[in-house]
């Protein structure tokens, strides 16, 4: 973990805040190559009603289009939450060189928590992995978001009961 990782993770956090602003789960991702941000993405599952509209996949898609290739062999992906199995698979298949994530995901993390698809030697590509970068800030975004959602549901339920 280095200063550069903190800098780029801060940018991924800004992407996550964009998701939160539109009531999406606040997860953000950026892809960097040769010191340049080549793509950004944030969760859009609810907005687009697409199960695959994860921050990482959207960023990977943009990076491939920008570079004109599906191979992202010299890139680093920064994401605020440990990649899920789907995103880890896309990272391996697009040959991302390095993945840096913020918060660990105890329910779906596939970059070391439940398993590590990114370093699995049976695949034709492995990515370097660095977890826990700005972990507290990334985790708080998620915790506060879900706390707010639960409070709103409780409020609606109470209002519904008051009407009866």
Image (cartoon, rainbow, N blue to C red):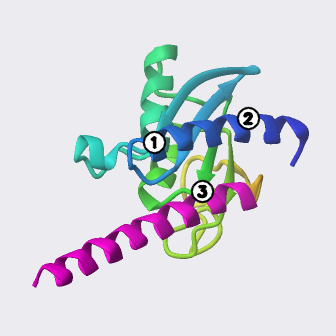
- Place of residue 23 in the rendered image (x, y in percent of width and height, measured from the top left): 38, 49
Q: Residue lying at the far left in this picture: please name it.
A: 164
- Place of residue 56 in the rendered image (x, y in percent of width and height, measured from the top left): 49, 43
Foreground residue, 28 or 88? 28
1 vs 2, front mark: 1
Q: Which residue is mark 3?
A: 141
- Place of residue 150 in the rendered image (x, y in percent of width and height, measured from the top left): 40, 72
Q: Is residue 38 magenta?
A: no
Determine crowd level at label 1: few under 14, some 14-19, many 20+ residues with C-alpha closer than 10 A: few
Q: CA distance from mark 3 to mark 1?
A: 12 Å
Quarter of the image where one finds residue 30: top right
Secondary structure, magenta segment, majority class: helix
Q: Which mark is residue 8?
A: 2
Q: Which mark is residue 21?
A: 1
Foreground residue, 155 or 97? 155
- Residue 83 makes an appearance in the image: yes
- The mark that comes first in sequence, 3 or 1, is 1
What residue range appears in magenta?
Answer: 136-164
3 vs 2, front mark: 3
């Amino acid at each position: 973990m280095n200063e550069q990782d903190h800098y780029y993770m801060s940018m991924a956090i800004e992407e996550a805040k964009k998701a939160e602003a539109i009531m999406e789960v606040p997860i953000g991702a950026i892809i960097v190559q040769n010191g340049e941000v080549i793509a950004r993405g944030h969760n859009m599952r609810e907005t687009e009603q697409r199960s695959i509209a994860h921050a990482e996949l959207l960023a990977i898609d943009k990076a491939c289009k920008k570079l004109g290739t599906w191979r992202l062999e010299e890139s680093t992906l920064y994401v605020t939450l440990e990649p899920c199995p789907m995103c880890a698979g896309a990272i391996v298949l697009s040959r991302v060189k390095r993945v840096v994530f913020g918060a660990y995901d105890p329910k779906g993390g596939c970059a070391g928590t439940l398993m590590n698809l990114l370093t699995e030697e049976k695949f034709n590509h492995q990515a370097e992995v660095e977890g826990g970068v700005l972990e507290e800030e990334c985790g708080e975004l998620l915790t506060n978001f879900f706390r707010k959602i639960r409070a709103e549901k409780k409020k609606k339920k109470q209002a519904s009961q008051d009407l009866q």
